């Protein structure tokens, strides 16, 4: 009796059976690549300044950043340490902030923000002193973190801006900076400077910060100038009316000494 062999399937049917798993694998791979790409693009977008302003409470900070001098620097460059690990771990912090955005009513000024020097020196490894100033940056840099003196560098947000955005804390009277500083005293008539955040300007000599380049040293600046947004010359009271006389009449040997050349070398009385 002849043995019956099983019928052979058509070649087309065998091809479909063999390509089924391969097709599913290809479809899965393409889908995975697209999902990973979409996730990467999304994560990249969440680290851009335009994304930060999507939360309305960040709008004042975005506007202040856009008007400042650091528009070429993204928010994450200052608020997150460099590296994939640091940026990845920060996503959990961002999720908590996102939860607060939808479940609370955030108001500012809020908590202080950590700003280590390592994020600043990435762009500013060396800061040169101004040759026309007595300010010693290296000396101040050793006193603490950069943010102590440069708390508003990235975005100088005012209370009025926070109030206009509806996110001002009812108890806020002054802006909270990133780091606490000592309470200084401003100098009446003087322009607002960062120094007064720590220093009592009324007890600080002008020559501590100012160095003249227009004339030879003549003693303390305030002897002849009134502090203002620009130096205003203020000559001491003179009995003879100094404006009608050449300076050399009283200062023949320079401005460190003065006497009346009409009355010998005697120092004027009552002037």
Image (cartoon, helix red, strand yellow):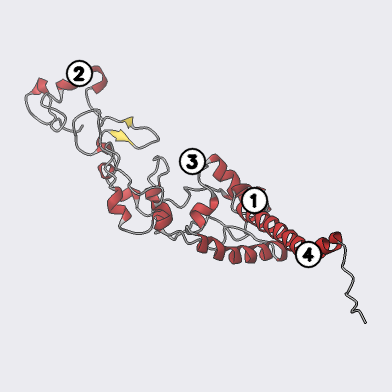
Instruction: Give the number of the disc on residue 246.
Output: 2
Q: Residue furthest bottom?
A: 1
Residue located at (15% from left, 21% from top): 248
Instruction: Give the number of the disc on residue 42.
Output: none
Is 74 left, or right, of 169 in this rendering?
Answer: left
Instruction: Give the number of the disc on residue 51.
Output: 1
Marks 3,2: beta carbons within 8 A: no
Looking at the rendered image, the disc whose residue lies closer to the viewer, 1 or 2, is 1
Image position of 7 with respect to 197: above or below = below
Residue 230 falls in image quadrant: top left
Does label 1 or label 2 sit earlier along the sequence? 1
Looking at the rendered image, the disc whose residue lies closer to the viewer, 3 or 4, is 4
SS at mark 4?
A: helix
Is 96 left, or right, of 118 in this rendering?
Answer: right
Gap between marks 1 and 2 measured at Cα: 65 Å
Which residue is labeled 4 in the image? Answer: 18
Which residue is labeled 3 in the image? Answer: 69
Is 161 left, or right, of 25 in this rendering?
Answer: left
Foreground pick, 64 / 175:
64
């Amino acid at each position: 009796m002849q043995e019956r062999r099983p019928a052979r399937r058509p070649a087309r049917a065998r091809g479909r059976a063999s390509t089924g798993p391969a097709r599913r694998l290809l479809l899965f791979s393409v889908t995975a690549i697209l999902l990973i790409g979409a996730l990467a693009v999304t994560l990249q977008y969440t680290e851009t300044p335009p994304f930060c302003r999507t939360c309305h409470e960040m709008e004042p900070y975005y506007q202040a950043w856009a008007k400042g001098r650091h528009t070429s620097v993204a928010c994450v460059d200052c608020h997150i340490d460099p590296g994939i690990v640091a940026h990845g771990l920060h996503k959990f912090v961002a999720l908590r902030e996102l939860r607060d955005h939808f479940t609370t009513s955030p108001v500012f000024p809020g908590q202080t923000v950590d700003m280590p020097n390592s994020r600043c020196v990435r762009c500013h490894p060396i800061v040169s002193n101004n040759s026309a100033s007595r300010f010693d940056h290296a000396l101040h840099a050793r006193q603490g973190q950069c943010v102590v003196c440069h708390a508003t560098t990235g975005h100088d947000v005012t209370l009025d801006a926070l109030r206009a955005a509806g996110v001002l804390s009812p108890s806020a009277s002054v802006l909270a900076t990133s780091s606490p500083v000592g309470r200084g005293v401003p100098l009446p008539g003087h322009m607002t400077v960062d120094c007064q955040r720590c220093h009592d300007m009324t007890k600080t000599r002008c020559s501590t910060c100012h160095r003249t380049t227009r004339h030879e040293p003549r003693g303390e600046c305030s002897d002849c100038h009134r502090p203002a947004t620009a130096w205003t010359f203020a000559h001491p009271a003179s009995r003879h009316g100094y404006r009608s006389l050449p300076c050399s009449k009283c200062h023949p040997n320079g401005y460190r000494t003065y006497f009346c050349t009409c009355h010998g070398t005697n120092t004027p009385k009552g002037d």
